[in-house]
Amino acid sequence: MTGALLEIADLRIRFAGAGEVVRGVGFALGRERLGIVGETGSGKSLTARAILKLLPRGAAMSATRLAFDGIDLLATGERAMRALRGRRLGLVLQDPRFSLNPAMSIGRQIEEAWRAHRAGSRREARDKALALLEAVRIREPQRVHGLYPHQVSGGMGQRAMIAMMLAPDPDLLIADEPTSALDVSVQGQVLSVLDEEVSRRGMGLILISHDLALVRSFCDRVLVMRQGEIVESCAAAALASASHPYTRCLLAAQAELLA
Amino acid sequence: MIAAHGLTARFGATLAVDGVSFSIAAGEAFGIVGESGSGKSTVLRVIAGLHAHWSGTLELDGVPQSPRRLRPGGAAQMVFQDPYGSLHPRHTVDRALAEPLAVHGIAAAAERIADALADVGLAREHRFRYPHQLSGGQRQRVAIARALILAPRLVLLDEPTSALDAPVQAEILALLQRLRREQRLAYVLVSHNLAVVAALCERVAVMREGRFVEELAVADLRAGRAEEPYTRQLIEASRGYRRR
Ligand SMILES: Nc1ncnc2c1ncn2[C@@H]1O[C@H](COP(=O)(O)OP(=O)(O)O)[C@@H](O)[C@H]1O
Ligand SMILES: Nc1ncnc2c1ncn2[C@@H]1O[C@H](COP(=O)(O)OP(=O)(O)O)[C@@H](O)[C@H]1O
Ligand SMILES: [Mg+2]
Ligand SMILES: [Mg+2]
């Protein structure tokens, strides 16, 4: 499939001792929202990390194809990968406390993310950072710009993280359980920020979650993973008529509440 | 069965449970739902007599409890999220089930063990296996059998399906439903998952930061008839994202 933003074929990841934990995953992604849903340990995060070539030590990866915007990532060295990661591929992780630099103010981190890929003055970088903080609906951008990660709430930290990832205008954003560590009272807010920015910028999104209801309502297309394999791949709107027994079981568990 | 009033529990300076009141009749299934860290497990541990730093009043079967008095075991039994953690890795299923019987000096252990295993849908060949030789669902069945072998009237369930694969979760929920009916058990079920609570309980308390913010019937929960904004947020979140 040409023109796809991302192409993956027969992705396999193994650990010595643990055996193969991602077993022949393949999919293609356009400028759309793809949800990957599955239970803890099903291989979602490793699949996401493989796209960025950021696998943990001890992981052995193979694939017959791994390409981003036509670039063969299998043949891309670490230096070129680093450039891609900062600029064209963004990753938002579950807990902002572990992905923000604790020793740098939030505003500075967003500025650095922007300046790493743009020639621009300090002044421009600051204006851009403030605009991004506003875009993710932080009410007092001037004040928050100078705060350190430990001085903000989880929900605000996660929105700052999203602002940082959006700074270089990436083509693809991967969000791995972006709201799972947040209080339910702020989850909706973070999701709607993500929703709006992804639509406005027309980028591709991979949303990873263990929550079928979330993925189904947020995404255009859904992959269901189980034990390292994709067991179902369908349009979000077609999930109700999904045929795989495992998918049916996930749907039934959710229906329990609405019944 | 249980009457709790102003139940408060601490871990050092942390106020984990902050003045919680509720009562549960014999045979009733009561759920406590809330986010991680809201204090759900601590409520169960106080009822089970596993946490001594509490105040308030607590009656079990009409008998006032005190933090210092050790509770006679048997009346209430507990099932935890992770059966791997609660079963001794070097004890067979048989031994895990024999122990509570021995502690209470109950005779005819062999028959009771066989019955308990049959009740939870385990085969005879599972009896002399070790925990690592069982699947996650089978281990949870053993933990349930162990809780039921003393014929309690109250079972305290702490996230009993959260560590299990979805199809196995459904099996364990069905098992808990059947056992409750057959043995007329009362349950206190703790979960972060509204659907699990709705599947098993008649009444639910919503817990946040150590307090019960609302208590409501499961029928009202299902219909989205909640008074408190926080309860509504939980219900909304469980239904996914709504684009505005
Ligand atoms: N560093 C590691 N070493 C060994 N096994 C790992 C490592 N990271 C992940 N795994 C295993 O790989 C499987 C998939 O993990 P992961 O992709 O993180 O799952 P998910 O994100 O779906 O919860 C799990 O069984 C996990 O235990
Ligand atoms: N053993 C412990 N030591 C110190 N603090 C604890 C301990 N167990 C729980 N807590 C604290 O008590 C509060 C309630 O915890 P818990 O009852 O486990 O919540 P839940 O089961 O709803 O996730 C939390 O703030 C938690 O950090
Ligand atoms: Mg993960
Ligand atoms: Mg708990």
Image (spheres, rainbow, N blue to C red):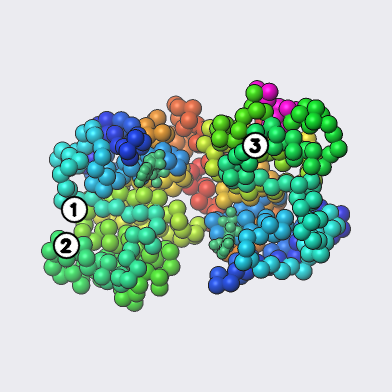
Which chain contains the residue that carries disc 1?
B
Q: Is residue A216 left or right of residue B152?
A: right
Magenta-drawn stretch, dominant element (helix, strand or loop): helix
Provide residue A178's location: percent of width, then percent of height.
61, 43
Asked whether B212 falls inside the magenta stretch, the response is no
Which chain contains the residue that carries disc 2?
B
- Amino acid under disc 1: Gly
Q: Dot 1 lies on which element? A: loop
Q: Nearer the viewer, residue A216 or A91?
A: A91
Ligand 1: image quarter: bottom right
Distance from the alpha carbon under mark 2 to that under mark 1: 9 Å
Mark 1 = which residue? B73
Residue B144 placement: quadrant: bottom left
- Amino acid under disc 3: Met
Cβ of mark 3 under 8 Å from ligand 3: the answer is no
Q: Look at discs 2 and 3 and give the one toward the viewer.
A: 3
Distance from the alpha carbon under mark 1 to that under mark 3: 54 Å
Cβ of mark 1 under 8 Å from ligand 2: the answer is no
Mark 3 = which residue? A104
Q: Dot 2 lies on which element? A: helix
